[in-house]
Amino acid sequence: MMDNKELSDTDEIFTLSEAANYLKLAERTILRMVQRKEIPAFKIASQWRIRKLMLDEWLYTQTTIPSVQQADAADKTPVSRMVDPKYMIPDIQPGTKPEILDALTDPLSQDISRGELDSFRRELLHREEMASTALGHGFAVPHLRQPQNNPLNGPLVLIGRCPAGCDFVALDHNPVYLFFLVVSRSEYSHLNILSKIFGLMHLHGALELFMEDREKPDFEEILVRLEGRLYANTPELVFNTDSPRTSQNKKGGSL
């Protein structure tokens, strides 16, 4: 199993001030962007931190201009509309990173070829070797560094839960219990989804909600409840709740 010493040198953690200097922006501007969930960030001891690798990924998406339709769909579609019961695994067993990723991606075997699945798993593991996607608070967000290499167009979020917890080389050195695997070939949508997940999982008691029902957890309903809390004071975000379910997502389709 990997340990923290095996992480890449690119796994650097920025303070807001350091991120501001890196982007050549004012620190208060970075803070506003973090608070609006425009940049993926997390907290350690109530202090905002930004992982350089994820900041670089976000920066890359800013070099491409999405179409109005892409931006609108990414902004208005909540995470709860990107999940499907067939892509939810509530009882992943503790294991190594490759074993966890294999279990998490196993439902995709019904949609893509064995070769595509193996290639996807290798790229996910390579991303983890660069820097762990477990940023603390008991959850991780495995994803490809290059979204265009995803096996499906998406947007799609696979959810896996490990009730016993596992070592996923989390930033806070604590076990990881919940996994959100992001699948989207759109760079804009990719970072947008990550930001939404970070926002939801930093709500008080979010992880506990996912861990409560040991038998038949309704992950989609939990996401809907958390989104209601997160966006209760943000009326300008009007989600497209009539968007198609991810069960309609087909390889090479429009989703």
Image: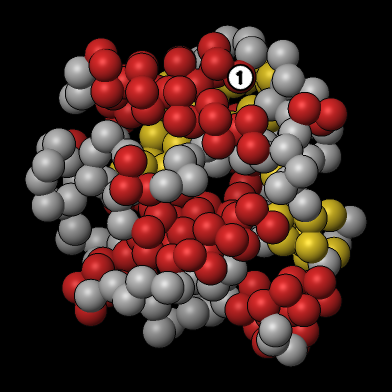
**Residue 141 visible, this orientation:** yes
Is 119 situated above or below 137? above
Percent x, y of residue 18: 81, 72
Residue in the foreground of this view, choosing between 155 and 187: 187
Percent x, y of residue 87: 33, 28
- For label 1, the crowd category at 10 Å Cα-Cα, with few meaning under 14, some 14 to 19 and many 20 or more, is many
Is 51 situated above or below 174? below
Percent x, y of residue 178: 58, 32
Residue in the foreground of this view, choosing between 59 and 255: 59
Is label 1 in a helix, a strand or a loop? helix
Which residue is located at x 23 percent, y 79 percent? Answer: 68
Q: Is residue 18 left or right of residue 162?
A: right
Q: Is residue 111 left or right of residue 44?
A: left
- From the image, tell me which residue sits under label 1: 97
**Residue 221 visible, this orientation:** no
Q: In which quarter of the image is the N terminus?
A: top right
Which residue is located at x 36 percent, y 71 percent? Answer: 64
Q: In which quarter of the image is residue 47?
A: bottom right
Which residue is located at x 37 percent, y 59 percent? Answer: 187
Residue in the foreground of this view, choosing between 134 and 84: 134
